[in-house]
Amino acid sequence: MLSPVTMILRGYSYEEVKCVAEVLLESKVCRNMEITLNSNDPYTIIEKISKEFGDQLNVGAGTVQTFDELKRAINAGAKFVLSPYMMTAEMLKYCHSHNVISVPGSYTPTEIAQSFAWGADIVKVFPANELSLSYAKKICEPMGDLNLMAVGGINASNVKEAFASGYKFIGTAGGLFKKEDIQKIDKQALKKSLIIFEESLN
C-alpha cells in the first residue's frame, strides 16, 4: 500500500524529479512520487526513476486517462497509477493482474461506490478543494471505512485537517514543495519545506 502522502510532479525534467526523489528518501510520510503523463517524456522519467529509486520509493504515474497510457506507464515501471476520473473495470483489472495500485478519480457517492465495486484500491476525490474536507467523513458514515485520497488544494495548512476529516491519503502538487525550488534543484530549500510539511501533521 502507499504511504499517506503522494508528491505529484507535473511538467518537471528528469533532473528535477531526481532531486525530489533524493529529498523524499528522508521523509516519514511521503514515499510516493507521481509523475504525470502530461509531462515531457513521462515514460522515460518513470522508467529511470523507478530503476534508481524503486526499491526505496513508490514511483507511479498520474493523469492516466486511456488503457494505452495505463499499459505504457506500467511497462515503464509504475507501481501505482492515478486518473483524474473513473477508470474502466478493464483498466482496474489490468492493474490488479500486474500488482499495480489503482487510484481512479471519483466525485459523487455513486462514482466512488462504482470505482470500489470495479476493484479500485484507493479512490481519489478530485478536486477535493471544491468540497469541504469533511466530505470524506460524510461519505464514510453510510458507506463504511473507505480508502479515500484527497487531491486538490492540499498543503501544510490543511493537511492535518484532511486526515482528521476521514481521508487516509492525500496527493499534492504544490502544497509540499515550491515549484521554483524544484526547478532550481535547490535541495536544501526542499528539505526545509519537507520539515515544515511533516511538522504540520503533529
Image (cartoon, rainbow, N blue to C red):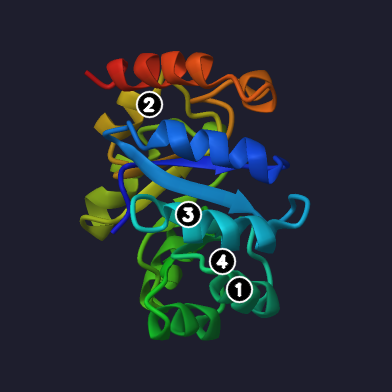
Q: Residue at x 59, y 41 (%)?
A: 17
- Element carrying mark 2: helix
> CA gap, disc 4 to disc 3?
30 Å
Q: Which mark is residue 86?
A: 4
Counting residues from the N terminus, which is met first, the one under dot 4 or under dot 1?
A: 1
What amino acid type is highlighted by mark number 3? Answer: Glu
User: Between tags 4 and 1, which lies in front?
Assistant: 1
Q: Are marks 4 and 3 in contact (CB under 8 Å)?
A: no
Q: Which mark is residue 124?
A: none
> CA gap, disc 1 to disc 3?
21 Å
- To which quarter of the image does residue 75 belong? bottom right
Residue highlighted by disc 3: 52
What amino acid type is highlighted by mark number 1? Answer: Leu
- Element carrying mark 4: loop
Q: Residue furthest right?
A: 40
Q: Residue at x 41, y 72 (%)?
A: 100
Q: Is residue 198 visible to us here?
A: yes
> CA gap, disc 2 to disc 4?
24 Å
Quadrant in the picture for the N terminus: bottom left
Tell me the crowding category of disc 4: few under 14, some 14 to 19, or many 20 or more residues within 10 angstroms, Cα based.
many
User: Between tags 4 and 3, which lies in front?
Assistant: 3
Q: Which mark is residue 159?
A: 2
> CA gap, disc 2 to disc 1?
29 Å
Q: Are marks 1 and 3 in contact (CB under 8 Å)?
A: no
Tell me the crowding category of disc 1: few under 14, some 14 to 19, or many 20 or more residues within 10 angstroms, Cα based.
many
Residue highlighted by disc 1: 70
Counting residues from the N terminus, which is met first, the one under dot 4 or under dot 3?
A: 3
